Image (spheres, coloured by chain):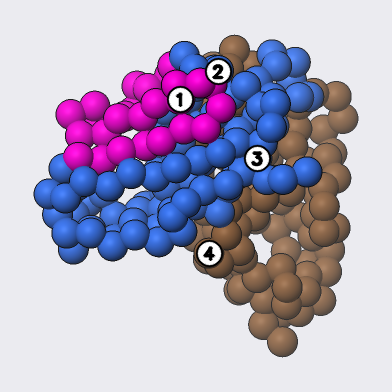
Chain colours: A brown, B blue
């Protein structure tokens, strides 16, 4: 079975500061990793994904994440955040045997303050 | 390209009543998913369809929840009878369903927010 732990439930940060949202996973098989963003009263939108290849993955809105197999982590980073980045962020993992079935973490609320 | 459509957006019912949610996936997407997202938690997969067949329903409470995708396109999720703990957002997602890694990305609808009183 696979699981995802998002280490911070809430992350407050000032505008233009860097941010890191942490995600650890556990799985006994090869995995695919995802970060989604959810704005209030909206569905989830894919930010970025790791399928294979380069461990540094770049996504939309200036976000990037690094896959670290030895530490089973997939932390999300942005060098300079904007007010509009305020949202809920979810890390998810799926197995290559059923790439479409994802297990989600409980989310991290990013609040960007002026 | 039209996204995943869900209706209604909001629903308020009393416990023991029944309720149904509807989802229309992106055209051409073979795989459809229903997730339950309880406040403060991540989405939890309830059921996964491949065309009109069920791939995974291991976390669906089958004594009260049912889902169908009769023609392999749109889908309905039903709860009968509803309990207080069913209050959540019900998200529908779809994907091409191809086993190729790069293509099996899920696209989510905006969800239906259910309140059971």
Instruction: Judge depth for marks 3 and 2 and give the one in front.
Output: 2
- Local packing at callout 2 (Cα closer than 10 Å; few below 14, some 14-19, many 20+) is some
Distance between the Cα atoms at labels 3 and 2? Answer: 16 Å
Crowd band around label 3 with a 10 angstrom C-alpha radius: few (<14), some (14–19), many (20+): many
Q: Which numbered disc flags the more N-terminal residue, 1 or 3?
A: 1
Pick the front one: B30 or A66:
B30
Looking at the rendered structure, whether the residues under marks 3 and 2 are on a common chain is answered as yes
Q: Distance of mark 4 from mark 2, alpha carbons?
A: 28 Å
Please, is residue A71 above or below residue B3 in the view? Answer: above
Which residue is nearer to you in this view: B69 or B50?
A: B69
Chain of the residue on which disc 1 is drawn: B
First to last magenta residue range: B54-80
Q: Is residue A104 visible?
A: no
Residue that numbered label 3 is attached to: B107
> Is A45 on the left-hand or right-hand side of A101?
right
- Tell me if mark 4 has few (under 14), some (14-19) or many (20+) residues whose alpha carbon lies within 10 angstroms of its own: few
Q: Is residue A25 above or below residue A75?
A: above
Q: Which mark is residue B51?
A: 2
């Amino acid at each position: 079975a696979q699981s995802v732990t998002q280490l911070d439930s809430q992350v407050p940060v000032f505008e233009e500061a860097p941010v890191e949202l942490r995600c650890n996973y556990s799985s006994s098989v090869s995995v695919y990793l995802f970060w989604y963003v959810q704005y209030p009263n909206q569905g989830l939108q894919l930010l970025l994904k790791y399928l294979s290849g380069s461990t540094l993955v770049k996504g939309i809105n200036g976000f990037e994440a690094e896959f670290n197999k030895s530490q089973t982590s997939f932390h999300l980073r942005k060098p300079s955040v904007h007010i509009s980045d305020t949202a809920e962020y979810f890390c998810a993992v799926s197995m290559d045997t059923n790439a479409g079935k994802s297990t989600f973490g409980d989310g991290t609320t990013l609040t960007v303050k002026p | 390209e039209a996204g995943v459509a869900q209706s209604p957006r909001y629903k308020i019912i009393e416990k023991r009543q029944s309720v149904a949610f509807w989802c229309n996936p992106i055209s051409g997407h073979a795989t459809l998913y229903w997730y339950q997202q309880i406040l403060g938690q991540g989405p939890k997969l309830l059921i996964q369809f491949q065309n009109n067949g069920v791939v995974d329903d291991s976390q669906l409470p089958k004594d009260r929840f049912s889902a169908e995708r009769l023609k392999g396109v749109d889908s309905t999720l039903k709860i009968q009878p509803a309990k207080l703990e069913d209050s959540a957002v019900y998200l529908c997602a779809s994907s091409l369903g191809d086993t190729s890694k790069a293509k099996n990305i899920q696209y989510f609808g905006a969800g239906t927010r259910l309140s059971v009183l």
